[in-house]
Amino acid sequence: MSPKKCKLAFIAWIGSLFAIVFLASPLRADSSIATYLDGAQNVVYAGNDQHVYQAVFTPGQGWGSMDVTIAANIPVLAMPGSPLSSFVQNGVVAIVFIGSDQHIYEANYTGSIGWTYLDITAASGTPIAAVSSSLSTYLDGAQNFVYQGTNQHIYQAVFNGAGWGGNDITGDSGAPAAANGTPIVTFVQGAAIGIIYICPDQHIHQSAFVQGSWGTMDITAATPNLPAAAPGSSLSVYLDGAQNFVFEGSNQHIYQAVFNGASWTEEDITADSHAPAAEPNTPITAFTQGSAVGVVFTGIDEHVYESVFQGASGTWGYVDLTYIAGLPNADATSALSVFIDAQQHFVYQNSGNIFQAVAKRTPTTAAKVSTPKQPASSS
């Protein structure tokens, strides 16, 4: 099924960034956003009809949109507010979401077959997801789908290439139950796997698979001077030799706990970058490119900001992406996503439309960092 053409509403070049607004089927206000690259740029979201859609930019053809729910003949709607995840493995596209029956579904696309779907919950025999569950995927040779069950345990469904299985991560690692609606992020570093989430005491916990077995630790307790996460805080993780776990504190600052392989340290990214205070419950997306680190969030003015660590200079600064790109504010409930090809793409929503700021940077080119217009809030 080919994507339909959609109207390119606005394009403008402003300094080192340009902005594209493309109109596809309207987003739900609570839609998640996922992105992936497969030769085209793909932005995945949920529509007002609870179908899963993707907007597709193909070089030489422009933007189009596709109803993945219809293309894959998926018999259920996405759960309202369903998290979304996407990845490409061996030329196969996978889009993952939670259905209205609380099962995890995967829409798959291969060039020879087209779109199909799979009920992962039924195939793996794992429990249904909680209504407020987050969702994360990671690849370690197998495909792993991590979510929260109705008993507040963290579960994963696993496809090893030959068959499906699953396990209770909370039970296997001896971890405490997670907070209802906890964000979940995952990473693979060498042979180790980390699954990160927040517990009812607002401490950040990690269940880790190392040397053939699962264990658990309280990252907040292990990190001197690290505050508890704010209720509703997002989580993100990035690897730059160290393990870095990013979250929002109750003072609306963005913090990170850093493990360098030997010890834990705390960093107040908001203070160090002189960035404005974050919006309560802001989504957070962190990434690395070359020696630079980007931490993206929405501010209290609903602008999209990036705190940037300049690897060459060893200093933090920030960029007001909304202001520089001349874009409208993010919705208060907007998700955020970042993907990188030859440029950096920062994707969010406003009033049912998808917007992106695109930074023309290379891994060795420092971002233009803003001089703060006002001190970051310390309240």
Image (cartoon, rainbow, N blue to C red):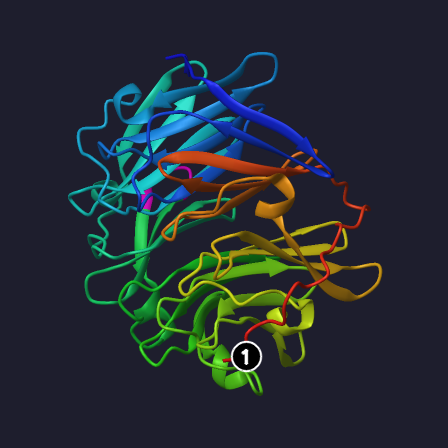
Q: What crowding class fits label 1: few (fewer than 14 Cα within 10 Å), some (14-19), or many (20 or more)?
A: few
Left or right? Give the position of 244 relative to 169: right
Identify the residue shown where x is 73% and y is 39%: 16
Q: Is residue 49 left or right of residue 377?
A: left
Seen in the picture, residue 105 relative to 211 is either above or below; the reply is above
Residue occupying image coordinates x 61% and y 12%? 60
272 magenta-colored: no
Locate residue 55, reporting x and y percent.
Answer: 44, 26
Quarter of the image containing the N terminus?
top left
| Residue pictured at 74% horizontal, 41% vertical | 361
Question: Residue 161 colored magenta?
Answer: yes
Q: Amino acid at mark 1?
A: Ser
Give the SS element for disc 1: loop
**Residue 13, horizontal then vertical, whole percent:** 68, 30
Residue 263: x and y in percent read 65, 81
Which residue carries the number 1 mark?
378
Where is 166 relative to 5, above or below?
below
Is most of the magenta stretch helix, strand or loop?
Answer: loop
At a point 29% along the width and 23% down the height, the residue shown is 72
Farthest-out residue, left: 101
In percent of width and height, residue 8 lies at 50, 20
Q: Which residues are magenta?
A: 160-164
232 or 320, which lies in front?
320
